[in-house]
Image: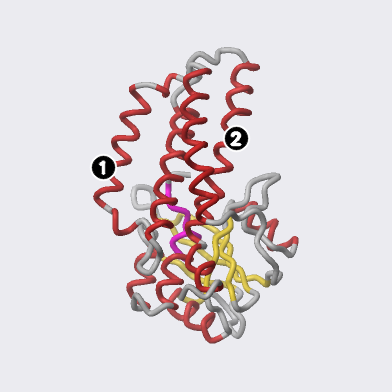
Amino acid sequence: MLSEPRSGRLAAWGNALLAGFVSPDDAVLAIVGDDAVHRVEGLPGEAGPVGLTLALGRLRVLGVTGYRVALPAPGHPLGLSGPPDFNARALDAEEAVVASGAAYGLVPEVYEAGPAGDVHTEVVWHCLPVRDAPPADVPSLGEAERELAEALREATEVMSRLDVAASGQVAEAAIDAYRARASRGAGEVLAPGYPPRAVRVLELAQRVGLLISVAYENGHGGAVSASEMAARGEALRPVERVARRAQVAAYNAYVEERERGGR
């Protein structure tokens, strides 16, 4: 939840490229991030994998006008519209990009390569046909912001009620560290061209996700029995779902505004 999904980077910087806010080189550099290389496989007209620069240009020629994000989880096909094969691949990867304007989707497959001590990450995006239909369960930015405010309160209350060890100083230290990282990279939360509200919603979604991650990663706290640990998971799952929904809403804001005539 906390780390920026690769699908989010591709969608955000792909949208900035389509809008003319960034150059192809800058977009690809931002999408690849700390990975060694990204390639796209299954692109129409190409026999094998191609680089991101060529792939983004080809998708534009094929009619792509924007990119949305999907962050599905078991029982929650968030951002997906089918068909079943694409949904299954996206669920396995826990993320995907769905193009607007042309019926294509991209699902990342991540590999580690290189000798011990010098391992690097490579990503292959599988280009697949998608169904031209509304994405599942994606809220508006306004809805997402309202849901997040409540989710943040709920997450804090749940952690305190279940005596999660991370609900005190550990959580506060983690949040302080997150804020420091966010302030250093404030301009990089989303790509150029996104509305300020989308940036705000994404930052809040990441903070809610941080609380959930800290709760799960810092021992069992007072939840010493299996039933108590199950109760904590049951209480936090809806909060985590709200944070994922908001994250998708933020990344998809560019396409949503453009389709409403905001661009």
Give 149 or 58, whichever is nearer the viewer: 149
Give 142 or 46, whichever is nearer the viewer: 142
Q: Is residue 5 above or below residue 163?
A: below
Crowding at dot 2, Cα within 10 Å, few <14 / some 14-19 / many 20+, comes out as few
Q: Is residue 247 above or below residue 225?
A: below
Q: Is residue 209 left or right of residue 143?
A: left
Q: Residue at x 47, y 20 (%)?
A: 160
Tell me whether circle 1 and circle 2 mark residues in contact (CB < 8 Å).
no
Q: Which mark is residue 99?
A: none
The part of the image, by quadrant, that contains residue 74 is top right
> Measured from the top left, where is residue 227 in percent x and y?
65, 17
The part of the image, by quadrant, that contains residue 38 is bottom left
| Residue 8 is a magenta residue | yes
Label 1 element class? helix
Labels 1 and 2: the sequence-earlier one: 1
Q: Is residue 144 above or below residue 51?
A: above
Distance of label 1 from label 2 (alpha carbons):
27 Å
> Measured from the top left, where is residue 21 in percent x and y?
35, 75
Crowding at dot 1, Cα within 10 Å, few <14 / some 14-19 / many 20+, comes out as few
Residue range in magenta is 3-10
> Measured from the top left, where is residue 16 in percent x and y?
40, 72
Label 2 element class? helix
> Measured from the top left, where is residue 225 in percent x and y?
60, 13
Q: What residue did someone put label 2 on?
A: 237
Q: What residue did someone put label 1 on?
A: 180
Q: What main secondary structure does the magenta stretch of the protein show?
A: helix
Q: Residue at x 35, y 25 (%)?
A: 170
Which residue type carries mark 1? Answer: Ala
| Residue 7 is a magenta residue | yes
Which residue type carries mark 2? Answer: Arg
Q: Residue at x 48, y 48 (%)?
A: 145
